[in-house]
Image (tube, rainbow, N blue to C red):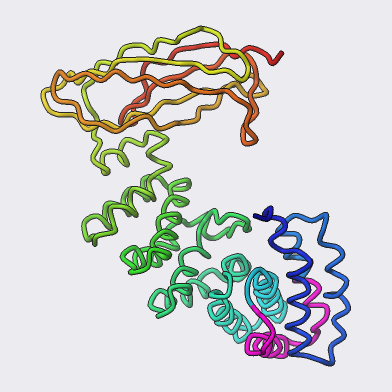
Amino acid sequence: MPFADELIGPPTAQALTQAIHAARPAAPLTALRAAEAGLAPLALRERSDLLRDALIHDLPGDYAAFARTIRAARDGSAPFRGWLIWPVTSALAATALAENTDEAFDDALAMLADLTSRLTSEFALRSLLDHDLDRALAAILTWTTSQDEHVRRLASEGTRPFLPWSTRVRGIISDPRATLPILDALYRDGSEYVRRSVANHLNDLSRLEPDLTVETARRWLADPDGNTAWIVRHGLRTLTKKGHVAALDLLGFPPATLDVTRLELDSPTVPFGGTVTFTATVRNAGSEPARLVIDYVVHHRKANGSQSGKTFKLTTTTLAPGGELAVTRAHSFRAITTRRYYPGPHAVELQINGVASGRTEFTLLPAT
């Protein structure tokens, strides 16, 4: 499997050059041909940008002429799909914005919708959204009724507040409600591909407006279909990890009356690369059965000496009145690429239905 940066490599540049040459045989395409040799040291987005700029350089003129060439390549016999679509759609958006007319803007939006099934147009869509959010969203909302699931998915995915590999759209960050009409139109979509995007979009929204996210999920659950519960659970996953009480309550885990013993550790020190094992007992001290989502939080020491918590799943259970549950977990500090460990004070605690308890300190020893 290729590394992410290799998704756009020399074969992509060659395929793009071939497709554009077939559409415009007279164009020398000097920048596109030269771009192939410059891809190696670049990250994925930089590779797309290099091919975008080469394409714009090799096809000078107004937006209409540029779009005609892209349509000809789309309809030609040379392959015109896969990762070459990212720089193509980005070039369409950039050329339309450079012309700065409503006609070019609207046509670029239509072209992005047309090409999205060949890879995705979600990255290129961002610049159009940033240029004129209201005009773009008005068009994108109409995509929610498209017969093509790729177009419907683009409506949700392309407008996500924190779309991976993409730039931020200032208007969406400052006004998270702006994309709610799109999500409301799609949360009961018949395609899992679309529904998963809606759930991820809702999860993005939770990073900006937790209460608005819960309010939206509550509305959806009041008018659900067979997939709404999953969308809500997936869309509230970050709030659940953070122990957001209203989100957990909506998911069926209201506050409970509990007795939780302090976590006991197998050792107050943990060797670098070793594990710490903790145990505790949770008892339902209330008079009604208690549905519980039990997580644990490890507070890792940071380089500056402060601590940052990361939540890990433990279990979900229901305890009868007076019922008890013994919980135990061995947590590893083996070296991983996604986290750097710093020796010194750490802590671990339980988090039950969003409420933290039983925090216990330990020390991670330096590497030997």
Total labels: the figure holds: 0
Looking at the rendering, in which quadrant would you find the N terminus? bottom right
Residue at image position (56%, 12%) is 270
Front position in the image: 76 or 72: 76
| Quadrant of the rendered image containing residue 210 | top left
352 shown above or below 116: above
Residue at image position (81%, 91%) is 25
| Quadrant of the rendered image containing residue 90 | bottom right
Residue occupying the far top of the picture: 268
Residue 250 screen position, x and y as percent: 26, 43
Residue occupying the far front of the picture: 1
Looking at the rendering, in which quadrant would you find the C terminus? top right
Residue at image position (75%, 84%) is 20
* Span of residues in magenta: 52-80
Residue occupying the far left of the picture: 287
190 shown above or below 248: below
Q: Main secondary structure of the magenta part?
A: helix
24 shown above or below 177: below
Horizontal arrangement in the rendering, residue 265 relative to residue 262 (left or right): right
Residue 217 screen position, x and y as percent: 31, 52
Residue 323 screen position, x and y as percent: 17, 20
Horizontal arrangement in the rendering, residue 303 relative to residue 199 (left or right): right
Residue occupying the far bottom of the picture: 26
Magenta stretch holds residue 153: no
Horizontal arrangement in the rendering, residue 67 relative to residue 135 (left or right): right
Magenta stretch holds residue 68: yes
Residue 159 screen position, x and y as percent: 51, 63
Front position in the image: 307 or 283: 283
Residue at image position (25%, 16%) is 259
Front position in the image: 339 or 12: 12
